[in-house]
Image (spheres, grey):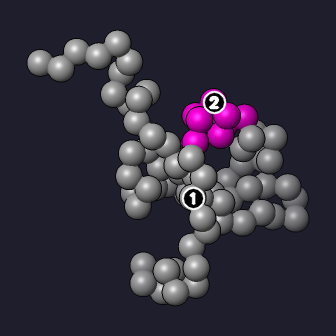
Amino acid sequence: MLTQSVPMFEASPRYVRVEGRTPEGFVMFAFSVDDPELNVDLIMPEPMFDAFCTVNRVRFLAPHTSSQHEAL
C-alpha cells in the first residue's frame, strides 16, 4: 500500500497551453493534469486565468503549431 502525505492528485504536475485571447478579455486554454496530451478546453477572464494558474502552479506549454493541429 502506498502512503503519501500529499494526495496523488495534488502532487501531479499541471499544464496549461494558451490557445488564444478574445477581444472581450477572455483567455482560451487547454488544462491538463499529469499528461499534457489529455486535456480539457477552458475559457475564463484574464484575472481569473491568472489566479487559476497561480493556485494550480501550472507549467506553461508552447502553443501548438498549425502542423501539430493538422496531425490531431
Mark 2 or 1: in front is 1
Q: In which quarter of the image is the N terminus?
A: top left
Q: Quadrant of the C terminus?
A: bottom left
Q: Residue at x 87, y 65 (%)?
A: 23
* Stretch of the chain drawn in magenta: 51-58
Q: What residue type is labelled 2?
A: Val
Dot 1: what SS?
loop
Residue 2 in picture, x, y percent from top left: 18, 20
Q: Which amino acid does label 1 sit on?
A: Leu
Dot 2: what SS?
helix
First along the sequence among labels 2 and 1: 2
Report whether 61 appears left or right of 33. Answer: right
Q: Main secondary structure of the magenta part?
A: helix
* Residue that numbered label 2 is attached to: 55
Give the number of the disc on residue 61.
1
Q: Which residue is drawn at 81% across and 64% down?
A: 22
Residue 56 highlighted magenta (yes or no): yes
Residue 52 in picture, x, y percent from top left: 66, 37
Q: In the rendered image, which quarter is residue 20 located in?
A: bottom right
